[in-house]
Image: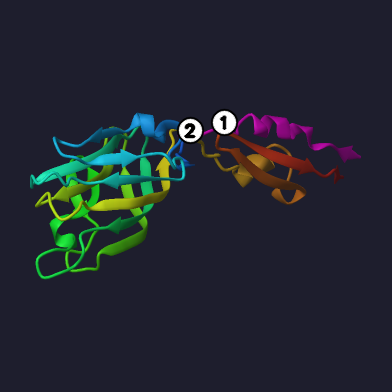
Amino acid sequence: MKKLTSSLLAVLAAIIISTPAAYAITGFQGIYAPSNWTFNANGGSGSVDTTNAPAKIMITGNDNTVGGIRTDFTITMLCAGSAEFDWTFDGEPVSASTGPAFDPSGFLKNNVQTQLTNNAGPEVQSGTNVIVPVVAGDTFGWYIFSTDGIVGPGIFTMIENFEGPSCIGGNIMPIDTTALFLAGIQSSSIWMLPVLTGAAGVGAFYIKTRANKE
């Protein structure tokens, strides 16, 4: 006699979505669209160019002859996860009295500066796959600090390949093999394919059954 494994429906009822998990939003779009960021020249001549968003942005530091001015571009994070990006910087020409040391630049997290540029490095510098852990409520972004305000600004010519966390997502709770046995089947009699549609935060198991013979 064949027993169809329709009793799996009872097991499926026990498969639920657990605590939401973040997935990445790629580029300056959605909650990371340029309009959601805050630009602050702090009285200087700095600027931000978002023309090429969502692919990349450009931040130009101060060069108004007044030193000690920081140019910021920041956002308040809504979700936990990590902010990731690549960067390219073009500073002052390197000489005995000029160079990137006069425009140290990097990223901001809760107004704490982490310098990415090398003071003793070349005029043009870059870095890839910078990863900054964040939680909801953190302020994150980039800064260019002009120490002298002359000889040309420091410029993040490209902040690209940006990824930021989204609050939408989900995890699928695993099916316990004991629960499957209590449902009247053996784990070897099914195929379980977890499916997660992160955009909608929906998880499910697609189960193809086989008939058991007695």
Residue that lies at the very extreme toward the right in this rendered image: 1
**Residue type indicated by callout 1:** Ala
Left or right placement of residue 138 versus residue 183 in this view: left
- Name the residue located 29 percent from the left edge and 63 percent from the top edge: 124
Give the Cα separation between the discs numbered 2 and 1.
Answer: 7 Å
Q: Say whether disc 2 or disc 1 marks the residue closer to the N-terminus.
A: 2
Q: Mark 1 points at which residue?
A: 200
- Name the residue located 24 percent from the left edge and 68 percent from the top edge: 122
Q: How many marks?
A: 2
Left or right placement of residue 109 versus residue 160 in this view: left
Q: Does the magenta stretch include residue 155?
A: no
Q: Quadrant of residue 174?
A: top right
Magenta stretch, residue numbers = 1-19
Q: Quadrant of residue 92?
A: bottom left
Pinpoint residue 186: horizontal percent, then vertical percent.
Answer: 72, 47
Nearest the eye: 72 or 133? 72
**Residue type indicated by callout 2:** Ile
- Name the residue located 15 percent from the left edge and 39 percent from the top edge: 44
Pinpoint residue 212: horizontal percent, then vertical percent.
Answer: 84, 44
Q: In which quarter of the image is residue 151?
A: bottom left
**Tags 2 and 1 in contact by the CB under 8 Å rule?**
yes
Secondary structure beneath disc 2? loop
